[in-house]
Image: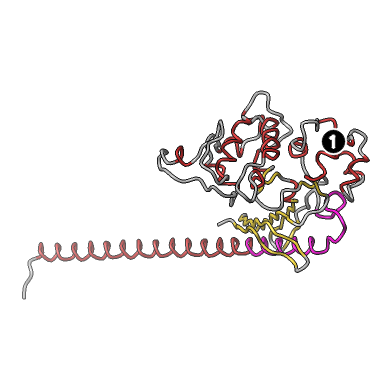
């Protein structure tokens, strides 16, 4: 069959174009496959580093438990190998950082209310003092108490269900002890800045030495404060007669000679017998609760495990556990 020359040229041109289009499609598919393969490879490598970082963190957590298990002296504080922080440990392609803190160095919010659901006015006054030192309005303590007490009677600056039910969205106060310190977000008048910013960032007269409120509070333990580990704001809240001069003397004394029992506090010259008699039921020198933070680093990735553990004769019981995602 005879095909005209012009028609033949069109067929050849169409075939050439078809081949070029097909080659272009195949090239794009090959490029996409290569890119996806590269992305998948990178994702696999990143996943490996992230997993390693998590294993390092878990190893650091287990190492912290071992350190605490071997801490068998009669007190907790200066002189213990975990006290004051531990240097990062190089490990494989990364490193492990471990921090162990005494949870009894903090003020327990749950002790603002008794087991019968009634306000403990002494503890309320203590927290009010701490708020004052941290440049937080002391009257906000009323809301923290009302959140936990069992009645529906509002304190002067507090709030009960009738207040929270009209919020958007509405909710009901717990009317029981805090489960986590994060519940403070829900309490009337409390906000993120008060919890997470240091006083100097919120107030022109805020003490630059102090950090944020979240570093000084807890919801774990019996409420006794370890005078070997408590920071200035926590020590200051123990009594209206506890001033910065006395607190500085206590901290200086314990760094040289940790308190082996609470009676040793009377060895600090500025601590009077009256002050000691007032606060001795609030304090301890031994802890059974510790906050562990273990961070693993690998290939630029980090993973952190945070836990609060209870130490007793049987070993350790985890009361709080969280890890980064």
State the residue at coordinates (44%, 61%): 35
Circle 1: element type: helix
Residue 287 sits inside the magenta stretch: no
User: Eyeballing the image, is 183 above or below 204?
Assistant: below
Which residue ends up furthest to the bottom in the rendered image? 1
Q: Quadrant of residue 34?
A: bottom left
Residue 79 sits inside the magenta stretch: yes
Q: Nearer the viewer, residue 191 or 120?
A: 120
Q: Nearer the viewer, residue 306 or 314?
A: 314
State the residue at coordinates (62%, 59%): 321
Colour scheme of the rendered structure: secondary structure
Q: Quadrant of the C terminus?
A: bottom right
State the residue at coordinates (87%, 57%): 74
Q: Position of residue 195 (x, y in %)?
A: 60, 39
Q: Position of residue 199 (x, y in %)?
A: 66, 31
Q: Position of residue 167 (x, y in %)?
A: 42, 38
Q: Is residue 283 left or right of residue 24?
A: right
Q: Nearer the viewer, residue 24 or 178?
A: 178
Q: Is residue 90 left or right of residue 23?
A: right
Q: Position of residue 251 (x, y in %)?
A: 85, 39
Q: Is residue 32 left or right of residue 187?
A: left
Question: How many residues crowd around disc 1 within 10 Å: few (fewer than 14), some, or many (20 or more)?
Answer: some
Q: Quadrant of the N terminus?
A: bottom left
Q: Which residues are magenta?
A: 54-82
User: Eyeballing the image, is 147 above or below 133?
Assistant: below
Q: Quadrant of residue 253?
A: top right
Q: Nearer the viewer, residue 74 or 57?
A: 74
Q: Which residue is mark 1?
A: 275
User: Eyeballing the image, is 111 above or below 156?
Assistant: below
């Amino acid at each position: 069959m005879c095909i005209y020359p012009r028609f033949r040229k069109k067929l050849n041109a169409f075939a050439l174009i078809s081949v070029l289009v097909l080659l272009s499609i195949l090239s794009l598919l090959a490029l996409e496959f290569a890119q996806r393969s590269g992305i998948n490879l990178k994702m696999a490598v990143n996943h490996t580093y992230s997993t390693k970082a998590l294993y390092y963190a878990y190893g650091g957590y287990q190492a912290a438990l071992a350190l605490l298990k071997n801490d068998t002296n009669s007190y907790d504080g200066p002189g213990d190998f975990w006290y004051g922080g531990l240097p990062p440990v190089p490990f494989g392609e990364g490193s492990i950082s471990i921090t162990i803190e005494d949870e009894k160095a903090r003020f327990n919010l749950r002790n603002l209310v008794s087991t019968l659901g009634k306000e403990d006015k002494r503890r309320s006054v203590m927290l009010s003092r701490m708020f004052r030192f941290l440049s937080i309005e002391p009257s906000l303590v009323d809301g923290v108490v009302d959140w936990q007490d069992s009645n529906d009677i509002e304190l002067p600056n507090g709030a009960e269900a009738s207040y929270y039910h009209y919020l958007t969205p509405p909710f009901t106060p717990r009317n029981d002890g805090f489960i986590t310190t994060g519940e403070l977000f829900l309490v009337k008048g409390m906000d993120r800045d008060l919890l997470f910013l240091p006083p100097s960032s919120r107030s022109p007269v805020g003490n630059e030495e102090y950090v944020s409120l979240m570093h000084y509070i807890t919801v774990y333990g019996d409420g006794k404060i370890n005078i070997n580990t408590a920071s200035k704001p926590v020590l200051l809240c123990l009594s209206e007669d506890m001033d910065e001069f006395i607190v500085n003397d206590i901290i200086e004394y314990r760094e040289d000679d940790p308190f082996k029992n609470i009676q040793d506090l009377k060895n600090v010259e500025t601590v009077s017998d009256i002050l000691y008699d007032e606060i001795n039921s609030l304090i301890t020198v031994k802890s059974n609760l510790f906050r562990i933070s273990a961070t693993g680093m690998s290939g630029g990735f980090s993973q952190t495990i945070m836990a609060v553990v209870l130490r007793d004769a049987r070993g350790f019981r985890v009361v709080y556990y969280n890890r980064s995602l």
